[in-house]
């Protein structure tokens, strides 16, 4: 005779989010023992998870949580956007985010290696996979923490929950903390939209810069061909694409060329000092296109495109604050999703 009833099934379902029939089977298999029923469901979940693990999880959400002393950002993937909108999945995301935030788990590796609700995180997630019915992955995470009262943190999560940003800044003066905190959110919104790869050009891998150089220069040459055909002004063809490449020798050589140009134009030498800085700034701008596209502080600020993000932040903080932490996550970045041939898949199933 069964040692459980509808109330026990309801309790198990509320505790695990498993289906009603699965809860009934679990209680029947465990002779009504609640803990053993949870273990049964967990084992069942692990089996389901193994089958689901081969499925690419490229959808999902980004989650952001911010307090005065820390901020966390996590990408949690599902297989479909439909599941990403599911309330059960959203509750799971909130639970994992709070778990990571409360336990200072600063990476996906730390989260996946943690213990949650008294069980290994892998087992916990496997049970969620069994419940939701899709492969789920805690793919990426990052945390910014304040190490002093003069460190400010803020972030932004876009309305679609597919892209989020967290930032941290060091301040010299406590009087500007509130102003900097507000501006960090504005800059986080900018970063969400403009997709910078790094905080500064200094963070670029030199090999990445080298690999990008020729292609970007050739692109401008091609654009000039079209501009010439249309009778429009041509763009300056750069020698370089990043400030990383503009050594002291390169800058000095550029100055000498500018002087030669001014000499050839018969400009009075006494006014060269007024002309050279502007021309040199233009040279630097023409030769840092990679920075302007992919480095946050070097991008033109969307709310004032006469300034870069770095220049705007310096103006707002009166030079008394510096952005030192930047993490941006967007759902599915870098994941290759294999396109399925539906007809071939059906034929395979029928064979």
Image (cartoon, rainbow, N blue to C red):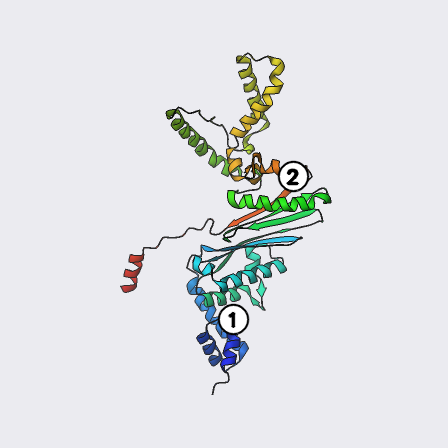
Element carrying mark 2? helix
Instruction: Return the mark for residue 222.
Output: none
Residue 246 to residue 44: above or below: above
Q: Position of residue 252 (x, y in %)?
A: 58, 23
Residue 50 to residue 303: above or below: below
Q: Can you tell which of label 1 and label 2 is closer to the viewer? A: 2
Q: Return the disc, 1 or 2, that comes first in the chain's sequence.
A: 1
Element carrying mark 1? helix
Q: Position of residue 242 (x, y in %)?
A: 53, 33
Q: Residue furthest bottom?
A: 1
Q: Position of residue 6 (x, y in %)?
A: 49, 81
Along the viewing direction, whichever of 187 and 9 lies nearer the viewer? 187
The span from disc 1 to disc 2 (Cα, nearest Å) is 50 Å
Residue position for label 1: 16
Residue position for label 2: 316
Along the viewing direction, whichever of 314 and 112 lies nearer the viewer? 314
């Amino acid at each position: 005779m069964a040692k459980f009833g509808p109330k026990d099934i309801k309790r198990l379902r509320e505790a695990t989010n498993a289906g009603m029939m699965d809860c009934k089977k679990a209680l029947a298999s465990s002779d009504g023992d609640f803990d053993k029923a949870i273990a049964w469901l967990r084992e069942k979940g692990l089996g389901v998870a193994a089958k689901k693990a081969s499925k690419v999880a490229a959808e999902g959400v980004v989650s952001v949580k911010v307090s005065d002393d820390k901020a966390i950002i996590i990408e949690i993937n599902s297989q479909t956007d439909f599941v990403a909108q599911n309330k059960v999945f959203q509750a799971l995301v909130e639970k994992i985010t709070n778990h990571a935030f409360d336990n200072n788990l600063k990476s996906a590796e730390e989260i996946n290696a943690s213990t949650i609700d008294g069980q290994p995180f892998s087992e916990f997630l496997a049970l969620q996979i069994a419940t939701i019915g899709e492969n789920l992955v805690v793919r990426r995470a990052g945390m910014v923490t304040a190490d002093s009262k003069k460190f400010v943190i803020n972030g932004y999560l876009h309305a679609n929950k597919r892209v989020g940003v967290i930032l941290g800044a060091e301040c010299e003066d406590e009087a500007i903390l509130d102003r900097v905190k507000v501006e960090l959110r504005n800059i986080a919104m900018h970063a969400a939209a403009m997709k910078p790869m790094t905080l500064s050009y200094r963070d670029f891998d030199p090999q990445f810069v080298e690999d990008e150089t020729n292609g970007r220069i050739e692109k401008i040459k091609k654009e000039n061909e079209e501009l010439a055909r249309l009778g429009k002004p041509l763009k300056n063809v750069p020698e370089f694409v990043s400030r990383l490449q503009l050594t002291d020798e390169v800058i000095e050589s550029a100055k000498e060329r500018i002087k030669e140009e001014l000499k050839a134009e018969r400009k009075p030498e006494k006014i060269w000092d007024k002309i050279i800085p502007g021309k040199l700034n233009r040279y630097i701008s023409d030769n840092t296109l990679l920075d302007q596209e992919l480095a946050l502080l070097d991008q033109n600020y969307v709310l004032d495109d006469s300034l870069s993000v770095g220049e705007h932040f310096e103006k707002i903080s009166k030079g008394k604050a510096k952005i030192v932490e930047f993490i941006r996550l967007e759902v599915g970045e870098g994941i290759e999703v294999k396109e399925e041939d539906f007809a071939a898949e059906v034929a395979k199933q029928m064979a």
